[in-house]
Amino acid sequence: MEIKNLASPPLFLGDNLALDFINSEYGTGDDRHDCFDDPRSVIDWLETVGLVPKGTVAPPDLLEEARQLRDAARAVVHAAMNSSEADLTVINSLLERGRPETRLIWDQDTQRYRIDVRSGTDSSAGLLWSVADALIKLVTDDKFEYVKQCEAHNCILLFHDLSKSHRRRWCSMATCGNRMKVAAFRNRKGS
């Protein structure tokens, strides 16, 4: 499979942080696009979804760790969709190493106690912890049954079908849905 680095932005069609992270590699068949081509591109994605502040410095191992997490997350979601088991080593390791520090502190300005959460933005695991946390919440949620893979031929995108009827079939009606409807129309017309 050839992975191309195109100049297009990541797709946010999954209706879930973990699924959007998995969908940072997309395409059909062997024509794939990886939104993560260097550590800065991972930081840009994390900034876009609001997980890190602007100007966050990327640790050198961030690209490798992000791709490992994405591959492991994809495997876990597909395994859960098929009621089977996946290797959880990468995810559990990242959850342990990146866990934010939570403390109770006294806020002098408000004269109240408050929770102070500090995530390790200096480590790859700290930067990616929120994505791994979103993944475990997704696969253990009662509504996981509504996680689907796009029905378009060779599309690998996943989405959380939050529609009222849960009958969504495509990652995006504008792309895959339209393409599939045109193909079905041509098949009916005998072209």
Image (cartoon, rainbow, N blue to C red):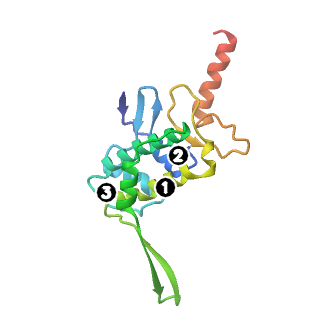
- Look at 54% across and 25% down and name the residue there: 153
Residue 3 got which mark? Answer: none
- Look at 40% across and 62% down and name the residue there: 54
Q: How many marks?
A: 3
- Look at 63% across and 49% down and name the residue there: 143
Residue 146, by quadrant, is top right
Measured as percent of width and height from the top left, residue 166 is found at: 69, 41
Instruction: Examine the rendering and report whether any part of residue 33 can be seen.
Output: yes
Residue 49 got which mark? Answer: 1
Residue at the left extreme, as displayed: 60
Q: Which residue is mark 3?
A: 58
Q: Residues within 10 Å of mark 1 (few under 14, many from 20)?
A: few
Residue 186, by quadrant, is top right
Query: If you read the primary sequence from the N terminus, does the residue marked by circle 2 or circle 3 appear first?
Result: 2
**Viewport quadrant of the N terminus:** top left
> Considering depth in this image, is 45 or 14 the residue closer to the camera?
14
Instruction: Examine the rendering and report whether any part of residue 10 can be seen.
Output: no
Query: If you read the primary sequence from the N terminus, does the residue marked by circle 3 or circle 1 appear first?
Result: 1
Measured as percent of width and height from the top left, residue 156 is found at: 50, 33
Say left or right for 181 vs 2: right
- SS of the residue at dot 3? loop
> Considering depth in this image, is 57 or 77 the residue closer to the camera?
77
Residue type marked 3: Ala
- SS of the residue at dot 2? loop
**Viewport quadrant of the C terminus:** top right
